[in-house]
Image: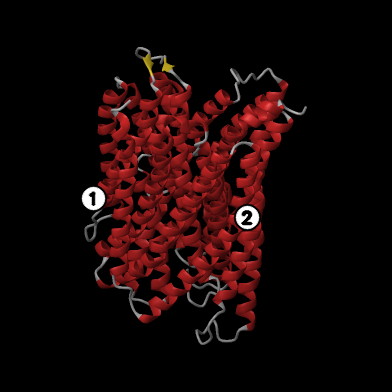
Amino acid sequence: MGDYTMMQWVAVIAAIIGLIVAFSLASWVSKAHAGNERMQEISGHIREGAFAFLKREYKVMIVVIVALFLIIGFALDWVTAVLYVFGALLSVLAGFFGMNVATKGNVRTASAAEESGMNKALKVAFRSGAVMGLCVSSLGLLGLGVIFVAMGVECQSVITGFGFGASSMALFGRVGGGIYTKAADVGADLVGKVEAGIPEDDPRNPAVIADNVGDNVGDVAGMGSDLFESYVGSIISAITLAVIVPSISPMFGGSFALPPMEGSLFPLILSAIGIIASIIGVFMVRGKEGANPATALNMGTYVSGIIVIICSIALSKVMLGNYNCAIAIISGIVVGIAIGKITEIYTSSDYKFVKSIADQSQTGAATTIISGMGVGMLSTVWPIICIAVGIFVANGFAGLYGIALAAVGMLSTTGMVVAVDAYGPVSDNAGGIAEMSELPHGVREITDKLDAVGNTTAAIGKGFAIGSAALTALALFASYSEVAQIDIVSLLDPMVIIGLFIGAMLPFLFSALTMNSVGRAANQMIEEVRRQFRETVGIMEGKAKPDYAKCVDISTAAALKEMVAPGLLAIIAPLAVGIILGVEALGGMLAGALSSGVLLAIMMANAGGAWDNAKKYVEEGNYGGKGSETHAATVVGDTVGDPFKDTSGPSINILIKLMTIVAVVFAPLFVSIGGLI
């Protein structure tokens, strides 16, 4: 036991190193040139709007945190309740730090593109995103590391409280940010591009600032808290299983003991290696003038992945005496990369699927939507097969613990994955600032190229989030069955079938709530933009200034009002089923939600990404280019896809894990009640 006293600190030390690097990158970005006065003014509006939203969102979240703290404290125990608050606060901090730098990085990326070209612009945008990535993984590991140092393996019974805090805040952040960004985006696109015929990010469009604010609150802060939750959830599931499962008898290879201390430390040290690998990956990203920025980003991602694979092999042998656990980890990393690549094939305009949507858009918006839905549904096949193979391999070599390790492996380089993902909205914002500041056309070309790559990398990030959601939820499900003392969830039990149907329905109900929320908020935005075009004389001539603040306020108020119902659904549903129908029915519900939720999440994320890039493909000059009938049809497709890919789709991942973690946290309560029916 004494050998592990120092090793317990490895996670905490790596997390602190990650935060120091994030801080130094943030100060490097802050020192970059912020452009001319007009650019700084626009950037100031975006930053102001983003922080105004976060401030109001956090006020709503504090009410939820206090309420759940009291419920957990009285219903279960106060240690779990305190850890719940700790997890919630770190999740919020990760989003806040990342967005703080992203709202500085946008204008500096535009300025770098104007002064120095592609290479410097890529560096500024990527390092702005890297701050978010390193904050997400470092704060997550710091929290878990501190809990482990303080409590040792005893933390297993209460550490799920930390995950519950992270998950609940992630859902509110993702849904609130998603509704905000898409209400603004849909309003800006439909009235600006289609009705008024003005370009994207045109300063005459009243919704344009709200649209750019939305990129930050949805795609940076929301996405950051989403991956924070995935990251800590995977580690928590591995720690809980390490303590519950005394030995592993895999299908392949001999049985081996799983000592609680080594088994719990293993995912923490692996994640510590992942942070160092991500830091190395971040500094590997260097663009060359005229080269495709995707090459540089992929280089960083692959390098960090290879470092983790090599270290996991050594770590598995030294700590657990075999290579089985390393094989499980590698299967997770390979599945993550495979899902990312498959996602790219279905959502990038370099491949036939997006081109076919653009081709069918020549006959109008209806065929755009039909073909996009088809591509989205088709895109579920290979990711599901990859996840199934990953589960088979991980379970075959290391049992249920192996499945948890596959998720940890997949998310070990979260610092790099989030950096690549968050770089996209920074580039998108830079393009908006360039357009509104009327910078030379060449600047917009650079930011558009960065943004196009960002669209694909964002889709890959969502692929990682979906894959890890499936694996983490499955591992947490195993933890739930142990805590709830269920040996088998039988499909011959009518209560289980009832739970299964309720669970399969929940992702659809949740998506309906979030989609309708975006629809209602976008409706208000469209009416306001039309009103300003109609009533404010001189907007179209550029002589009068639109009222940007009014549109920012519409998005903020709508997002805060609309995010509450979907957020509460994920917490209330498992509590209601567990208390009323009992632990077996809740097991069925979790299985139903996992299977339908993963499929729906993949379909929505990929259909949305494909519609978006079909529009961009037409805007490049294909099928008539900008202003053509085909372009108008693809704008409609992109508008339908906006809430698919940025609100409902990514939020389903969190829904699945949040419901599972609520089940694990409250399982002792459900067992004591025994089901009211």
* Residue drawn at point x = 65 percent, y = 36 percent: 574
Q: Is residue 637 visible?
A: no
* Residue drawn at point x = 42 percent, y = 54 percent: 455
Q: Amino acid at mark 1?
A: Met
* Separation of residues labelled 2 and 1 (CA atoms): 43 Å
The residue singled out by tag 2 in the image is 63
Q: Whole-percent x and y of residue 218?
A: 50, 57
Q: Amino acid at mark 2?
A: Val
* Residue drawn at point x = 65 percent, y = 38 percent: 75
12 to the left or right of 507: left
Per the rendering, the mark at residue 5 is none
94 to the left or right of 207: left
SS category of the residue bearing label 2: helix
Residue pushed farthest left? Answer: 288
Q: Whole-percent x and y of residue 558?
A: 64, 62
SS category of the residue bearing label 1: helix
The residue singled out by tag 1 in the image is 284
In the rendered picture of this protein, how many numbered marks are placed on residues? 2
Corner quadrant of residue 570? top right
